Image: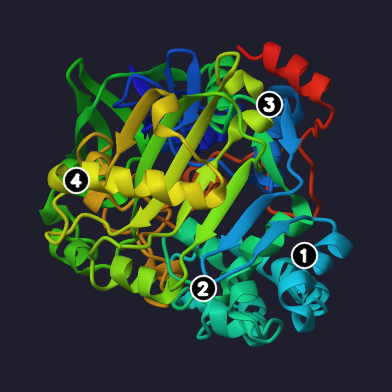
Amino acid sequence: MKHDAIIIGAGPGGLASAILLAAQGLKVKIIERLPTVGGRTSAIEADGFRFDLGPTFFLYPRVLDEIFQAAGTSLAEEVPMVRLDPQYRILFGSGGKIDATPDIERMEREIAAIAPADAPGFRRFLKENRQKLACMEPCLGLPFLGWQDLAQTRLLKMLPMLRPHQSMDTYLGRFFRDPRIRLAFSFQSKYLGMSPFRCPSLFSILSFLEYEYGVFHPLGGCAAVTAAMARTAQRLGVEIVLDSPVEEVLFEGRRAVGVRTAAGVEKARAIVMNADFARSMHRLVPDGLRRRWSDRKIASKKFSCSTFMMYLGVEGAFDLPHHSIHIAADYARNLDEIERRHVLSDDPSFYVQNACVTDPSMAPAGCSTLYVLAPVTHQHPNVDWPRERERFRAKMLKQIEKAGFTDIERRIRFERIVTPADWDTQYDIHLGATFNLAHSLDQMLHLRPRNRFEDVDGIYLVGGGTHPGSGLPVIFESARISTRLLLADLGVKPVHFPSSGSGIVSAPMLNAPESILEAARSLP
């Protein structure tokens, strides 16, 4: 039986693509290598504890809400969420802390407590980035299939505001003099796996999105979002096959016509690839068919950092924020050790999610989940993870005491560690680079692998490895771009297809503890 589209991978980009295509009446099949949906946005569940494997921040819900609306439902109907306040606590190794809040007056007071002269810059930052997002949003929905797309009048008009050759840190110097305050508004570059001293300034909209539209916790974790997407796709008739690695993409000449799995051959009019870009190219598409993205070219590209992960189910509770971010005293050195020297830091920055302070459903009664992440180098000969794993674990248990998570080791009831080597071998991520290709100027827009893959016919890319890039809202946008191209190529005129707009549709916000508990009890 021939499908209209086969989607390789049931990550957020693949699931969003399946919903959009099936909503237009196409026959769609998803084939996933792992035994669960979600990819990096899936869950780890054991002994009554539940952790998100990857993303824990849910931002800018409008894009996903529009995708759900195309399927006749909404994000509010599918996934209850809590808007966090404070959004997170930032602790500076060089001294001071900020409880980041979307309340403008409170946030000004937080800034003034450690850098009085910088407090007025917050409103100016919001105002300018509000304008920047309004300019950028339509362009984020464009496919950028060649350099000609850069010559569009509206994009050229944006350049003075975007300042593409400035780093985030340099740009933020226009608003904040204290380096700690600049870091508070630029650590989000780590969502892209980049340093704020190198990340292009246009990504200042990441921190703006948090303050303008909120940081959310989906009840049950971000994995609850991809689970809801899978259910929605299945209601539309999408077939999802799990635990079934694709062994090769089949071609007739330069056109992809199907895939082969252990179960046999599946034919399709189009292939949507949601697997890790570099790894899937190496394994699934013959090097001889790839001109622009040959194995040699991919090897020459810059890849993001990786992450060292600890998932700890612990006895007891912590009266600490949902999210805590600790920035090393010498952050520039920490980043240099990750990105250039490829060594492990003596004083690593880290992040801890204390989800049960918001969502008790994530752990058994009387217990908590702690999700600990330290940015580290991607796979490199300088770091032997089988040898370093236990030493770095011990270091991180000491590090998180700086955020108030003390006396942890004796309280651990469940533990799982994921190193860059595990991201590489268990999760099939090239070099264990969890944020994919770096988002440098020479690897953005048309210089990224394109949504309609340029090297062969019939393959469309979604996920962090294509335009617009990494991060859940951006990955959902990649699905919209790629599926629009696919539908046009198949001659299907979309009906009520969601497109980028300016209005924001809020996710449901639950603030009273009893409403949170009630919603959590209703989770599947």
Q: Which residue is mark 3?
A: 79
Q: Is residue 246 above or below residue 121?
A: above
> Considering only order in the chain, which callout, 2 or 4, is on the residue closer to the N terminus?
2
Q: Are discs 4 and 2 less than 8 Å apart at CB?
A: no
Instruction: Tell which circle, 1 or 2, labels the residue nearer the N-terminal end.
Output: 1
**Residue nearest the observer in this picture, 186 or 73:** 186
Element marked by disc 1: helix
Q: Position of residue 193 (x, y in %)?
A: 41, 60
Mark 2 — residue? 149
* Above/below status of 267 relative to 199: above
Q: Which residue is mark 1?
A: 110
Lower sequence index among marks 4 and 1: 1
Q: Earlier in the sequence, mark 3 or mark 2?
A: 3
Q: Which residue is mark 4?
A: 285
Of residues 98 and 477, the one drawn nearer to the viewer in this rendering: 98
- Residue drawn at x 83%, y 79% as measured from the top left: 120
Q: Measured from the top left, where is residue 29 in percent x and y? A: 41, 23
For residue 236, say whether it is visible. Answer: no
| Local crowd size for mark 2, using a 10 Å CA cut-off: few (<14), some (14–19), many (≥20) | some
What is the secondary structure assignment of the residue under circle 3?
loop
Q: CA distance from mark 4 to mark 1?
A: 52 Å
Q: Earlier in the sequence, mark 4 or mark 3?
A: 3
Q: Residues within 10 Å of mark 3 (few under 14, many from 20)?
A: many
Check the picture and name the quadrant holding the N terminus.
top left
Q: Viewed as shown, does residue 220 lie left or right of 12? A: right
Q: Position of residue 251 (x, y in %)?
A: 19, 40
